[in-house]
Image (cartoon, rainbow, N blue to C red):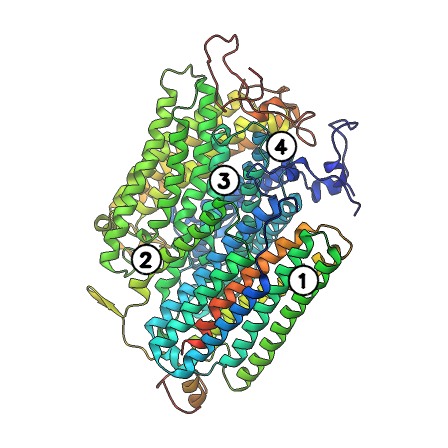
Amino acid sequence: MTAHAKPLATTRSVAGMPTPRLAIWWVISSEIVIFGGLLTAYILYRLAHDAYSADSAHTNQYIGGFNTLVLLTSSLSAVLAHKAAEHGDGKQAAKLLLLTCLGGLVFLAVKSVEWSIEISHGYTLTASPFWSFYYTAAGIHASHVVAGVIIMAIVARDAARGRELHRVEIIGLYWHFVDVVWIFLFPLLYIAK
Amino acid sequence: MSEEHAHPNYVKVYWILLALLVVSMIGPEIGIRWLTLVTAFGIALVKAYMVVKNFMHLNVEKRFIMYIVSTCLVFMFLLFAGTAPDVMKQEGSGWFKPEVDVPTADAAHGGGEHAGDSHGGESH
Amino acid sequence: MAQSAQTVPHGGHEHHESHGLSYYLFPLDHKIIGMQYLFTGMFMALIGGFFAYAFRMQLAFPGMSVPFFGVVSAGEYNSLVTNHGSIMIFWVAMPVLIAAFGNFLIPLMIGCDDMVFPKVNRLSYQIFLLSVIVLITSFFVPGGGFGGAWTAYPPLSANAQYSLTPLGSTLWLTAVALEFVAFLLGGINFVTTVMNSRAPGMKLYDIPIVVWMIVIASILFTASVGPLIAGAVMLFMDQVVGTQFYDPAAGGDPVLWQHLFWFFGHPEVYVVLLPAMGITADVMVTFARKKLFAYRTVLYTAVGTGVLSFTVWAHHQFIAGIDPRMANVFTITTLLISIPIAEMCFVYIATLYGGSITFKTPMLWALAFVAEFLIGGVTGIFLGASGADIYFHDTYFVLAHFHYTFFPIAIIAVYAGLTYWFPKMFGRMMNDTLGKIHFWGTIIPFNMIFLPLFLLGAWGQHRRIYSYQNFPELAGDTMQNLRILATLSLVTMLLFQLVFLYNFFRSMFKGEKAGKNPWRATTLEWTTESPPGHGNWKEMPTVYRGPYEYGTPGRDQDFWPQNEPS
C-alpha cells in the first residue's frame, strides 16, 4: 500500500473533535449495551436463584484480583503512552504500548491457567448456570482483550516509526473500556459470594 | 494531537486504584454479607469512575460524549427494570413459576449429569 | 491498487475514468458500496418474495404441488415463513433503507467526498455479504433452514429436539449476528460522518431530513442491538455447547430471550421506519414545490420517537406470561408512541397543503406510504392495548397490521426513494408510464392481500399454521376463499414487480439522460454530475441555507439550491 491522500471527509471535524475519537466513543457506547445486556441477564438470574451463590464460592478471588491488578497496570501504561504520543515521542509511546500488550498477554495467560484448574475440578461451561455465565462473560471480555492486544501491537509498530500517533489515544480509550468492564466483572464473578 | 489538555498525575491515580482494589479484596475476608456487597460494588463504581475520568478524560471531552454514553447506560437500567418483574421474580400477581432445582456444579459432580437434585452441597 | 484512484485529489483527473474489476469488487467509494447493498438487498427481496409465494400457495391450496417449488411439507412451511420474515427485515429493509440509501446519500447530501472510514465501510459490506452466504447456506443443510419464526423464541430455537433443524438454527443465528456486526460498523460510520464531515456552512438544521432520519436510526440501532447480541451469544451456546441459559428446568427463563429480543426488536421498527419517513419527506417537498412544514418539529419528533421506542418493547409479550402490572405500563407507553408518528403524518399532509403537486412516480409512492402506513398505525392501537391484544395476539390480525407497517416501509418507501434518486444513481431517467403501471399494480394487490387477512384474523385465524384443514371452525369456504383471494393478489403483485425490474434495468442503460437536477430539487446531491464521479464534486460545495427552499418570493426559479450564494 502506498501512502495516499485521504478523503476530504476524514479531515473535517465539524463536531469539534477528531473523527477517530468520536468513532471510538460510539464503539464504546455500542459495547456498553452488549455487556449491559449480558450482565443484566446474569444479575437477574443471580438474584433469582441462590444456587448461583453456592457455585460462585468456588471462584478464586486471588487470581481474579491479580488479573485486576494486571489490567489496571496496563491501563496506566496505556495512558502514559497517550501522554508520550501527545508530546510527539513515538518511540516512548510504542514502548509503553508494548508494555500494555504484555499486560494483556499476562492477563490471558493467567486466565487460561485459572480456567484449566477450574475445568479440571469439573467446573466446566455446562456444569451449572453460574459457570455458564462465568465462562461466557469472561470469555467475551477475553476476546476483547485479544482484539485489543493485536490492534495495539499494530499501533505500536506504527508509533515506533513516528506514524499515526493519534491512534495511540484511540486504542488506549478502547483498552480503558475493556478495563472498566473487568472492574465490574471482578466483583460480579469473584467477590460477591 | 493538536488539542492538548492538562494531564492528571496518572501514577497517583494508579496507586489509589490499587488501594481500592486491596480494600475490595479484604471485604469478603470480614465475612459480613452487606459489607462485602458495599465494598465490592461501591468500590467498583469508584474505580470505574476514576478510570473513566482520569484515563479516558471524559471530564474534558465534549459534553455530548457524556450524554451518549450515559444514555446507553440509562437504557440498560431500563432493560433491567422492564425485565426484572418477569425474570427475577418467582411469582407475581396471578402467576407463579413452578419450583425447579437450579443445578450447581457440586450436584453435577455427584450425579455425573446435571440433573440437579440438591444444591448447596458441601462436597468441596 | 485501484483504490488509490478514489482518494486522489480531483485536479488533473477526469471524473469518468475507467476502473479495473477490483474497483467494483472491493470498492472504497461510498456510492459503489451503496450500490452493492442495494443490489444484494434486491436479490434477497426476490428470495423473500418467492418464499412468500410458496407458503401462500400452500395456504390457499393445501397440499398442492406449487409451481417452481413442489409440495410444501410442514417443516418446509415453517422454514419458509421464518426465513421470509428474517430476510425481509434483516436482509432487505435494513440493507436497502439504511445501508444503501445511507451510503449513497449521506456524503452527497452533506457535501463531502466520502464516508470518514471508507475501509470500515467496505468491511461492513463484506461482513454483510458473508451473512447472506451463511443464511443461504442454511437452507440447504441437512434438516433444512431454521423454522422457529424470525423471533427465534427458545426453547424452540435453543433445542434441536424441538426445532428439528440442528444446523439450520445455528447458521440462521450466526447469519443474524454477522448482519448486526455489519450494521454496527456501518451505523457508526454514518453517525460520525454526519457529525464531523458536513460541508462548510451546513448547520444542524440545514441537514436534509432523510439524512437526519438515517442518523437517528443508526443511533437507535447502535443503542438497542447490544442486549440481543449478548442474548444471541447465550442462545448460540445453548444450541451448540449445551448450556442452559434459557432452559426453565435449570432456572433459565425463555421470557428473558423475549425481553432481550424485543428490547432490540421494537426500536428496530423505528430503525427502518424513520429512514422511510425521511425519504418520503424529501420526495414530497420536491414534488409539492413547498418547504417542509415544521422542519424542526419533525426532527424533534423523530428524536422523541426514538427515545420513546426504548420503553415499549414488552407489548409484544402481553400473553407471554409477563406481569400484568408491567403490561399496564407498556400499554401506556405504546399508545403514547402513536402520537409522534401521527404528528409526523399530519406534518406531511400540511406540507402538501397549498403546494403545486405533480404526480410523478416517486410522489405517488410517497403519498401511498403515508396512506398505507396510516392503516398500519391505526390497527396497531388495537394491539398496543393489552386487553384487546389478548384476543388479537397470534392471529392474522397481527400479521396484517405488521405488514401494513413494514410493507410501506420496506417496499413502498424504497420504491419512492429508488425512483426519486435513480437519475442521480445512474444518470438516466426511469420511464414514468411504466413506473405508474408498476405503482398501481403493486398498491392495489397489496391492499387485496392484507385487508382480507385483517378479517381472517378478527375471525380467529391463528398464525403459523401449516394447513387449516384440521381446524373445522377455520376451514369453511368463506375463510378459504379469502385466503385464495390473498394468495392470488400476492401472485399478481409479484408479477407486477417484473415491470419494475424491466424498467429499472432498461432505464439504467437506455433511459433518457437525466442531467444534474431533473427534479429541480434543492439539496446538495443535485448540484453535481449524474452519476457523481470520484470525490463527488470538482469543487466542494458550501452551504448557505436550509434544505427545502422552494417557492421563495422574488426569485425567478421556484427552488433555491443549498449551495447557491444569496
Q: Can you say whether C524 is above or below B34 in the image?
A: above
Spatial distance from mark 3 to mark 1, Cα to Cα? 31 Å
Image check: C465 left or right of A28?
Answer: left
In the shown orientation, is residue B34 left or right of residue B24?
left
The residue at 43%/60% (across/down) is A37
Q: Residue at x 46, y 13 (%)?
A: C551
Residue B82: assigned label = 2
Q: How many marks?
A: 4
SS assignment at label 4: loop
Q: CA distance from mark 3 to mark 4?
A: 16 Å
Q: Alpha-carbon distance for marks 1 and 4?
A: 32 Å
Q: Tag 1's secondary structure?
A: helix
For residue C112, the mark is 4
Query: x, y (%) of residue C23?
Result: 73, 40
What residue is disc 1 on? Answer: A150
Distance (Cα) linking label 4 and label 2:
42 Å
Disc 2 with disc 1 on a shared chain: no
In front: C546, or C455? C546
Report the quarter where the C terminus of chain B lies: bottom left
The kind of residue tagged 2 is Gly
Q: Chain of mark 3?
A: C
Amino acid at circle 1: Ile
- Mark nearest the camera among 2 and 1 is 1
As helix, strand or loop, the secondary structure at mark 2 comes to: helix
Residue type at numbered disc 4:
Cys
The quarter holding residue C13 reads top right
Identify the residue position indicated by label 3 in the image.
C215
3 or 4: tag closer to the N-terminus: 4
Q: What chain does mark 4 sit on?
A: C
